[in-house]
Amino acid sequence: MNAYLEQRALKISTAMTLLVASLGVAFGLLSGSRSILFDGVFSTIDAAMSLLALFVSRLVMKESSQRFQLGYWHFEPMVAALNGSILLLLCFYAFLNAISGLMEGGRELAFDVAIGYAVIVCAACYGMFFFERRLNRRARSEFVRIDTQGWLMAALITSALLVAFIAALLMQDTALAAWTPYVDSALLAVLTLCFMPVPIGIVRRAMGEIMMIAPPALDAEVHASMVPVMRRDGLLEYSSHVAKSGRVHTIEIHLLTTPEFARDAGVARLDEIREEIASRLSIPGEQRWFTLSFTAERRWL
């Protein structure tokens, strides 16, 4: 993973998110649109979380300390879980607000101002999506990947807002004009329902890492790597444990050997096996915590 590119992407994304958030709040108040105001508040919280992600991204690059002897990797899923939880609560509150608006008969809004907002934000969101997607091909960052998905979601939903606002503007001088007050609240309800899968997915993945649920792909890869190793004479069986926390993958393997194993070759034979296993793992060395132990007693497995 390229830390410099990750930092650069997050800084640019945070600046653009703050700009979009400011536009959302300003245009939401000017047009009287709750859906645009929600979009602005959502972006404001997202910007705050991006700043926190940027801080954690810098923190995890530091060396371990006396207090955090295993490093700072575990902060990444904690920040992701916090981010997703706050956004999910915001979506739920906004959805209830939308239903309340529909029950109260909706509200009039300035569609021309709303259309202007949607055009500007669409351009910004699509631009950031393509920029970050291209950059993350080299950065290979989980933070940037999540951020890229967020920009795509924002772009698609703002596009839907643009189409809806244009349609509502055209309805004003027709027999359907009586329905235009409901457009904003209906859009807000749809907007929140479309946004909800994003924070739900973020929370689900983050909680899986916080609870140290073994990633199936990594577990399968470790077992596949051990197949040729276990053909060596003197190796009887093994146990393995894997977990993922942020960008670090923890891999522990305990090998049961005969009492005479590697008696002549010594530590060199053990390091040879360690190198053989490591060479078959796809996780880069800087993103894994790999521990291999040998024992002749089954109780240590």
Image (cartoon, rainbow, N blue to C red):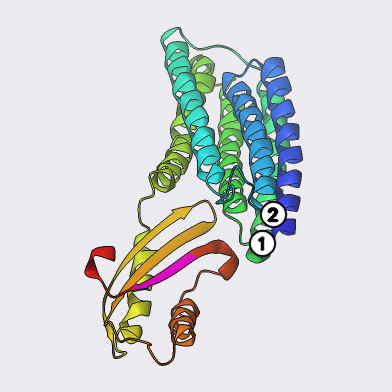
Nearest the camera: 7 or 294?
294
Q: Is residue 105 left or right of residue 215?
A: right
Labelled pair 1, 2 in contact (Cβ < 8 Å): yes
Residue 20 location, quadrant: top right
Badge 1 is on which residue? 139
Image point (59%, 40%), residue name: 154
Q: Earlier in the sequence, mark 1 or mark 2?
A: 2
Q: Quadrant of the N terminus?
A: bottom right
Along the viewing direction, whichever of 78 and 80 lies nearer the viewer: 78
In the rendered image, residue 201, in percent from the top left (x then y), is placed at 43, 43
- Above or below, 98 against 156 in this view is above
Q: Say what amino acid the circle numbered 2 marks.
A: Glu
Q: Using a 10 Å C-alpha cutoff, classify the residue at mark 1 as few (fewer than 14 neighbours), some (14 to 19) or many (20 or more).
A: many
Label 2 Cα crowd, 10 Å radius (few <14 / some 14-19 / many 20+): many
The stretch of residues the image draws in magenta is 290-294
Q: Residue at x 66, y 28 (%)?
A: 44
Q: Amino acid at mark 1?
A: Ala
For residue 176, say whether it is visible: no
State left or right for residue 192 relative to residue 9. left
